[in-house]
Every structure is written in structure tokens, then in C-alpha cells.
Image (cartoon, grey):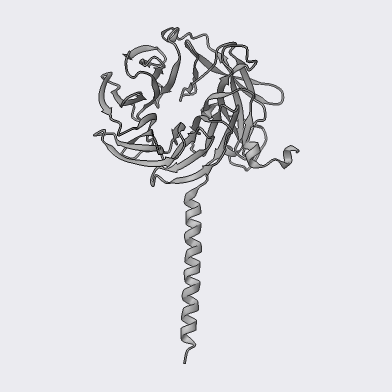
Amino acid sequence: MGKGNKTDDELSSRKYGVPLYGAAWAPPGTAVKEDSSAESETPASDTVKRHVVLAGGGGEGHSGIPNAILLSAFDFESNSLSDQPVAKHGTASDLPYRIAVHPGGEGVICSFPKSCRWFEWESATSTDKHTLSLKPSEKVLQQLEDVGQQLSMTFNDDGSLLAVGGEDGKLRVFKWPAMESTLSEANAHNSVKDLDFSPDGKFLVSVGSGPGRIWNVATSTSVASLSKENDEIFGFCRFSRSTDTDQVLYITAMRDKGGSIVKWNTTSWKRISSTHVVRDPVSAFNVSPDGKLLAIGTIQGDIFIISSASMRVQTVVRKAHLGLVTALAFSRDSRALVSASLDSSARVTLIKDKKNDGMSLWIILLIILLAVAVAVYYGTSKKP
């Protein structure tokens, strides 16, 4: 089948030959225009390709599957991912596992089995196009050498702090880029599964075995413990990203009936509600930058997009991947969601504007009601 006959799903989902564990969007400042010299009336946001960073591989051994950090381009206008990576950096026998993109566009940190490494953006202009890639930085993260596998990494919103959580249960927070340690907790959890900074940078949440924990960034102390109920197992955590004064914290929880999202008050740290969302175990989770949407990926390869206002499922993409979803990330403008999977595929799902859809439905209902009212009026007026 020719490219022109491919469906949107085929164009927005690509297989890159390596099991993928990490996915993130390159900051908008690193976007590449297709033709900067050409004049067009099309909005700039539609003439720019955004880039997606992916990480994965076959691990150490002789599987024949390489380990690499990949860079792919996504075109919003055609809703398509590049069929091949636009850049690729092999990492020999070291499996790149988790990645965190610096919000200021400085580069990308990636965790490997024994250490973490820093990569910088690199751009090159040839006669016909402008390309973007990643290169290993000369900056060596000495504080993250020989620390074992780090399962979670995140920057705060202004990029001044970096938090990493290890398979060994140790939590570390550093000032960036100085890499000056501000928090080092050896037994934060048996294993640190996930981390997230609050939008104002005052708090850090960590989840792993046992209850979730809230850390005061300024004092580097634990200030709250988020208890589990019954047979809950916490998996992922994210603060809401909205600008509302009433901030909330979301934590995914697994029980025998399936996956739920638990909401917490960020002042009292009390549980607000728990909403059952899926029957299958949750394997990935994220929140959109505008705070309006939550995204869940499952071990069956399904993706659920949920309204944060109603906590109702807004969109379901069944079998978005053939393997479990390993990572989810919204674009900075919340227009798109990239997902990655162990089946070697990456996919971008465009976010539909449900507000417009809802308005259209109300208009249709109003027209129907007016038509009925007119029919009733004229039917009544014709009676003797």
C-alpha cells in the first residue's frame, strides 16, 4: 500500500525496531521549520515539525536488538510521525531507560543501568534542510555515576531542580546545573517508582512501595504521608498543572477490580476522591500542561484520555499499541499525546476539542427544540 493510501492511524504510529521505555517532547524552541524562506499564510504552529525523543533497546546481551536514543519528527498538519528516526544515537550495551527533557531546552538526561548521562541538542543546516539531533555532552554527572538504575527522573517547571529516584529506594534532589545536592534520602521507598514536582516548585511527591510521600523542597524534609486504602498499590503520581488556586495531586492505584485515579488536596494532603477508570493494570500516566486532561496507558496497549474536571473518560484508543504502554507525554501546548511501547512503536494521538463538539451538540438540540416548538405552535393555531 502506498503512503498516500495510509490511514491516519498508520501515519501517526510508527515502529522503530527497538522496545521503547521512554518518550518525551523536545521543547518548542528546538522545533524545525520545513521551509523558513517560503511565504505562507498557514499559521506558524502548523508549518513546524515537533520532535519526539524516544529511548529503548534490547538491553545487555546478544539479542541483536540495539540500544539507542531516537529523535523522530511529528507533523501536526498531516498527523504523521517520521517513518524513520531523524536522528539516532547508539548507546552500545547500555539500555537507555527513562528520560527527562530540560524545560528550558538545554538538553536531555537519560538513565542507564548504572548511571545517568546528559545529552545536548545539536542542529545542523545543509543546503536543503535543517536537522536536529542529540549528542553526548562533555558534562559528566559525577553525582549520578555508579548509582544503579534510576526508575524516575524529573525537573521542576523552571528547570532549576532535578529529582531522581532509584531502584534501590534512594531519592536524590540536585540544584541544576550545579548538581549541588539538596536532598538525599536513602530509604524513601523500597523502590522509587515515580516522582513529580508541584507547579510552584514547593513540593515533591514520590511513590513506591508503601504510602506516597510529600517532600518540602525548601527544607528537604518529608511533610506528609499519603496512606493507601485496603489493597491499593500506588503506581504513578502527578500534580495538576492548572493555574487554579485549588491544586490537586493525582496518584494511580491498582486494586483487584482494576486501575483508579486518587485525588488529594495539596494543602491538607487528605484524600478527596478515588475514580475507577480501567480494568487492566496501569503501566503509564501523565497530566496535560493545561491541567485539563489525564492520560492512562495499560498493559494491554490501550490509551484512555480523561477529563480532569469530570473525571470521565473522554477518549479511548483501543490497541493503540500491541504491547504494554511504557511512557506517555503531552506536548507543551496540550495538543497531542505521545505514547511508547515495548512493541517498538511510538504513537501520537491528537487531542480533540471536546468544548467545540459539545457546543455543536447543544446547537443541534436547540434547533430541534425550536423546530418542535414551531410545529406545535402552527399545529395548534390551525385548529378551529
Query: Residue 349 sits in which quadrant?
Result: top right
Q: Is residue 8 left or right of residue 24?
A: right
Going by the picture, which residue comes out furthest to the right?
2
Task: Tell me the quadrant of the picture where the N terminus can be found.
Answer: top right
Going by the picture, which residue comes out furthest to the front?
256
Q: How many marks?
A: 0
Q: Position of residue 288 (x, y in %)?
A: 45, 36
Q: Is residue 352 left or right of residue 84?
A: left
Q: Is residue 368 above or below residue 343?
A: below
Q: Position of residue 239 (x, y in %)?
A: 36, 32
Q: Is residue 117 above or below residue 71?
A: above
Q: Residue at x 58, y 13 (%)?
A: 91
Q: Residue at x 47, y 56 (%)?
A: 359
Q: Position of residue 126 (x, y in %)?
A: 69, 21
Q: Is residue 266 above or below residue 86?
A: below
Q: Is residue 33 left or right of residue 242?
A: right
Pick the residue in front: 200 or 208. Answer: 208
Q: Position of residue 222 (x, y in %)?
A: 26, 22
- Specify whether residue 202 is in view: no
Going by the picture, which residue comes out furthest to the bottom?
384
Pick the residue in front: 322 or 381. Answer: 322
- Specify whether residue 289 is in view: yes
Q: Residue at x 35, y 37 (%)?
A: 262
Pick the residue in front: 109 or 259. Answer: 259
Q: Residue at x 65, y 32 (%)?
A: 34
